[in-house]
Image (spheres, rainbow, N blue to C red):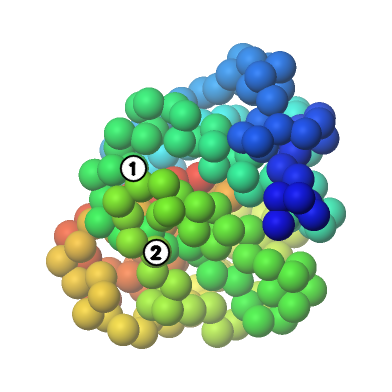
Amino acid sequence: MNLIYPPICGICGKLNQNSLCKKCEIELKKQEEINIINRNGEIENKYFDELMYIFKYEGQIRKLILDYKFNNKSYIYLTFTNFLLKNEKIFENIKKYDKIIPVPISKKRKKERGYNQSLLIAKEIATKTNLELVNNCLLKTKNIIEQSKLNKEDREKNIQGAYIIKNKQLIENKKILLLDDIYTTGNTVNECSKTLRQANPKKIGILVIAKD
């Protein structure tokens, strides 16, 4: 596959085995804002325990994420994954979890986009750590209005009841890492966490690329 589709840097497009060239890696490091928040006061009735993110959702990072999600540049998942795992603080915290779950998207959204952007990153993290990927537990049953198109109040209402849980035994008493691309108001990951709590996990952490 590498012969047909050789790996490239997700930013500049030059051939690179790590999907992130040294020059672009240096530029991204200048934008790092590594944070692990254990007590996030932005949300009332919070259902997760901690939030990890590595960038602010602005500038080059914002453009990169939008390209990844909406401009058919699925290969950028390798760039994001490699950058996340190269950060020692984030990597060591990730290893404290047992299982990783990507925030699911609806069947309609997946058909339009062609892939679940969170699943691609979660798969790659699972292959490079001791975490087990679980993709048959948290399911999205409603094709809602895109959260990015709504204000804070409407986002909370829009996402309510969008997810269901199956195979609860897979995550019972386990430390769960929930992965998404962006944290804006936190309503999406909080609703997912609320649903996952039905299975009595030991802990739920959130990992995102960027926080707005």
What is the x, y in percent for residue 147? Answer: 66, 61
The amino acid pointed to by label 2 is Leu
* Disc 1: CA contacts within 10 A as few (<14), some (14-19) or many (>=20): many
**Residue 50 versus residue 122 in the image, above or below:** above
**Left or right: 147 in relation to 121:** right
**Left or right: 56 in relation to 71:** left
Which label sits on residue 24? none
Quarter of the figure with residue 132: bottom left
Q: Measuring 55% from the left and 84% from the top, which residue is drawn there?
A: 141
* Structural distance between the alpha carbons of marks 2 and 1: 13 Å
Determine if residue 186 is in view.
no
Marks 2/1 in contact by CB < 8 Å: the verdict is no
- Residue under pointer 2: 133
The amino acid pointed to by label 1 is Ile
Disc 1 element: helix
What is the x, y in percent for residue 210? Answer: 57, 38
Q: Measuring 63% from the left and 48% from the top, which residue is drawn there?
A: 77
